[in-house]
Amino acid sequence: MRSLIDIQQLSVEEIDELIALANDIIAHPDEYREKCKYKKLATLFFEPSTRTRLSFEAAMYELGGQVLGFSEAQSSSAAKGESVSDTVRVVSGYADIIAMRHPKEGAPLVASMAATVPVINAGDGGHLHPTQTLTDLLTISREKGRLSDLTIGVCGDLKFGRTVHSLIAAMARYKNMRFALISPEELKLPSYIKKEILQQQHIEYIQTTDLTAVMPELDILYMTRVQRERFFNEEDYLRLKDSYILTPEKLQNARADLSILHPLPRVNEISTAVDADPRACYFRQALYGKYIRMALILKLLEVA
C-alpha cells in the first residue's frame, strides 16, 4: 500500500507513466469506465476547495467507483476535537482510498501513517499539493509535447504558493530547464528552495520584479494569486494583491506559442480579456486535473 504525500516520492519514470496513462484515458475513456467498480474514494477536506475536490470526485465516478466524505472541517468530527489519525483509521474501514486536504502542514503525512489504505495529499497548508503538480506536468506535456528544454516563468506569490514550490521541484528533474522567478520583493521564492533545488542541481534561474521584461523569453507563464489566507497582516495583503495582473497588453511581446497556466481559483491576476487568447491554458489545465487524478487512483489501487 502506497500513499502520495509529496511529488518528490515519484521518480521521473513514475511521473512519465502517470502522464502516459492519463493520455490513454483521454484517448480511450470507455476502456476505463468500470476500472474502479465497487471501489470507494473518501474525500476528507478540512479546508475549502472547488476544483481539487470535485475533480477527485469526478475522477472516481468516471472510473465507475463511488465517493463519500466531507467538504469542510465543521461537518466532520474534527469539530468535536477528533484527531486526524483517528479520523483516517475509521475512514480506512469505509473506503479503499483517501484524498485529504488540510490547513496544517504535515497532516496528510500523519494520516498516511495511520491509514490502512492509500492516502493522497490534496493540499496541506502552504506546503505541498502533489496532484496539482501532476496536473501542471500533464498540461505542459500536452501543450508543449515535452517536459524538457523549457523556460518557465512563475509569477506572483512565490513565497507561500505551494503549487509553485512543487512545480519547481518536479520540473527541475527534467533536462535543460530554466526558471524566471517573478514576484514582489516580499513574496520571493524561499531561499531553501533556491539552494536545495535550483542551485544544488545547477539550474539556471533569474529573479525579477518585472514581468514584461522577461515575457519574450518564456515558453510557459505560470501565474498565481496572492493568497489572503497565507498572510498574517491584512495591510500587507492589500498592498501586494494586485502586484501582477496579466492583460492582453502585457502579452504583446510574448511568444506565439506561449502557454499560460494558473492553478485557479483566479481572483484578478489574469484579466478575463486574456481568456479568449489561444495561449490561455488554465481551463484546459483544470480539466486535465481530472484525468491525472484518474491515473493516480488507478495506480495507487493497483488496478491499472
Image (tube, rainbow, N blue to C red):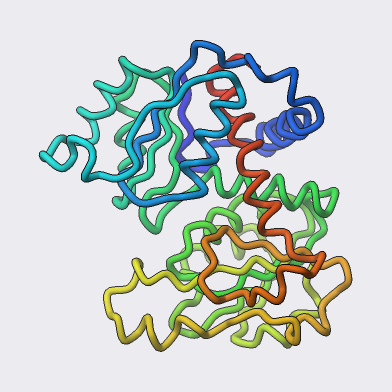
Vertical placement of 71 versus 21: above or below? Answer: below
Q: 21 and 49: which one is in front?
A: 49
Whether residue 101 sits left or right of residue 53 in the image: it is left
Whether residue 222 sits left or right of residue 141 in the image: it is left
Question: Which quadrant: the C terminus?
Answer: top right
Q: Quadrant of residue 257?
A: bottom right
Give the image location of residue 174, x and y in percent: 73, 50
- For image coordinates 60% across by 73% down, the residue present is 155
Q: Quadrant of residue 266?
A: bottom right
- For image coordinates 62% across by 50% down, the residue present is 286
Residue that protrudes farthest toward the right in the picture: 256
Q: Is residue 178 visible?
A: no
Whether residue 279 sits left or right of residue 227 in the image: it is right
Q: Is residue 37 visible?
A: yes
Residue that protrudes farthest toward the left in the picture: 80
- For image coordinates 42% across by 69% down, the residue present is 227
For the image, the number of numbered tags is 0
Residue that protrudes farthest toward the top in the picture: 38
Whether residue 71 sits left or right of residue 64 in the image: it is left
Give the image location of residue 15, x and y in percent: 67, 37
Vertical placement of 126 versus 290: above or below? Answer: below
Give the image location of residue 99, x and y in percent: 43, 34
Give the image location of residue 214, x and y in percent: 74, 82
